[in-house]
């Protein structure tokens, strides 16, 4: 004998329907909340050689195109001229902001040829605060020319309102002892208040095994590729001296990190990383 099964719809009482709807909505809320607690950050570090490319030409538009191609959220710039004679008195920080559509903050470290020279930050994130921090350096002598060193610190707001600190810096080029002291100063200034997630980027003028980098890595995580791809000089790179660091380590995850194959716009190649920021 063949039996026919008949399925009748079950009518839930209103109270059960409401409970089911609330459970469904709560699951959606949890998923959205989880998404809001992470933010992907595209970070670029670029020593722009005061606008001068390896062909000897000063071309800010060319640098802007290199920056724009990475679609960055945060850009740390070094060797930026503002009103300096050699670079035709151009306000390079402001011009790069205009060409990229990003906000800019400039951190001068010295007077030079009637203008200012230093570091800068470009960002598409809302800016909450800006600070300039001088770093230790040895003053020039008749036998050795050095340059004052510093860092610009820009605090920005993440997509869920959390603050993030972003630092651009440039260590001394010709005195190893200065670089060691500058690394110690960075650790001293920016690792005591560990509750603030921080990204540090710059031209450290030191290779990965050198003491300044080892000092930094006591407090920072280095977002570097396994091969430590060289970043300078731009035409035939031999040394990795440009970096992106972050801390605390648990607040970030490296999705991608690379040296961009760009040999014309500056004497350094830009460093790029995609970081996932886990906002607490």
Image: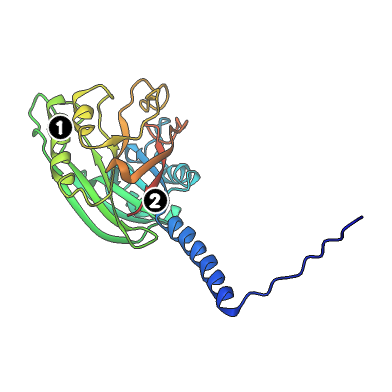
Does residue 264 sit above or below 36 in this rendering?
A: above
Which residue is tagged 2? Answer: 96
Q: Position of residue 48 (x, y in %)?
A: 35, 39
Q: Please give left or right for residue 254 compared with residue 3 in the image.
A: left
In percent of the image, x 34 and y 63: which residue is there?
Answer: 161
In percent of the image, x 27 and y 55: which residue is there?
Answer: 155
Disc 2 crowd, CA 10 A, few/some/many (<14, 14-19, 20+): many
- Say which element carries label 2: helix
Q: Position of residue 166 (x, y in %)?
A: 29, 49
Q: Nearer the viewer, residue 94 or 200?
A: 200
Label 2 vs label 1: CA separation?
A: 27 Å
Q: Is residue 233 in sight in this rendering?
A: yes
Which residue is tagged 1? Answer: 146
In percent of the image, x 33 and y 22: which residue is there?
Answer: 239
Q: Position of residue 58 (x, y in %)?
A: 39, 40
Which quarter of the figure is the N terminus placed in? bottom right
Give the residue furthest to the right.
1
Q: Please give left or right for residue 99 compared with residue 106 in the image.
A: right
Give the residue furthest to the front.
1
Q: Please give left or right for residue 117 compared with residue 259 in the image.
A: left
């Amino acid at each position: 004998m063949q039996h026919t099964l008949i399925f009748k719809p079950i009518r839930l009482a209103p109270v059960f329907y409401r409970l089911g709807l609330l459970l469904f909505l709560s699951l959606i809320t949890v998923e959205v909340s989880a998404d809001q607690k992470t933010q992907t950050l595209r970070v670029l570090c670029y020593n722009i050689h005061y606008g001068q490319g390896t062909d000897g030409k000063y071309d800010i538009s060319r640098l802007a195109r290199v920056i724009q191609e990475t679609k960055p959220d945060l850009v740390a710039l070094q060797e930026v001229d503002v009103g300096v004679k050699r670079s035709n008195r151009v306000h390079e920080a402001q011009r790069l902001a205009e060409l990229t559509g990003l906000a800019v903050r400039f951190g001068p470290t010295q007077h030079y040829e009637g203008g200012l020279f230093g570091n800068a930050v470009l960002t598409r994130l809302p800016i909450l605060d800006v600070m300039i921090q001088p770093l230790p350096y040895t003053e020039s002598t008749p036998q050795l020319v050095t340059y004052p060193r510093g860092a610009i610190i820009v605090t920005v707001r993440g997509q869920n309102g959390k603050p993030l600190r972003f630092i651009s810096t440039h260590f001394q080029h010709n005195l190893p002892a200065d670089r060691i002291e500058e690394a110690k100063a960075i650790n001293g200034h920016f690792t005591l208040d560990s509750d603030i997630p921080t990204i540090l980027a710059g031209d450290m003028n030191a290779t990965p095994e050198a003491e300044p980098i080892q000092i930094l890595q006591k407090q920072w995580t280095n977002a570097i590729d396994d091969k430590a791809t060289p970043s300078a000089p731009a035409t035939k790179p031999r040394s990795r001296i440009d970096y992106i660091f972050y801390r605390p380590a648990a607040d970030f995850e490296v999705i991608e990190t690379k040296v961009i194959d760009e040999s014309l716009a500056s004497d350094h190649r830009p460093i790029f990383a995609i970081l996932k920021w886990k906002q607490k």
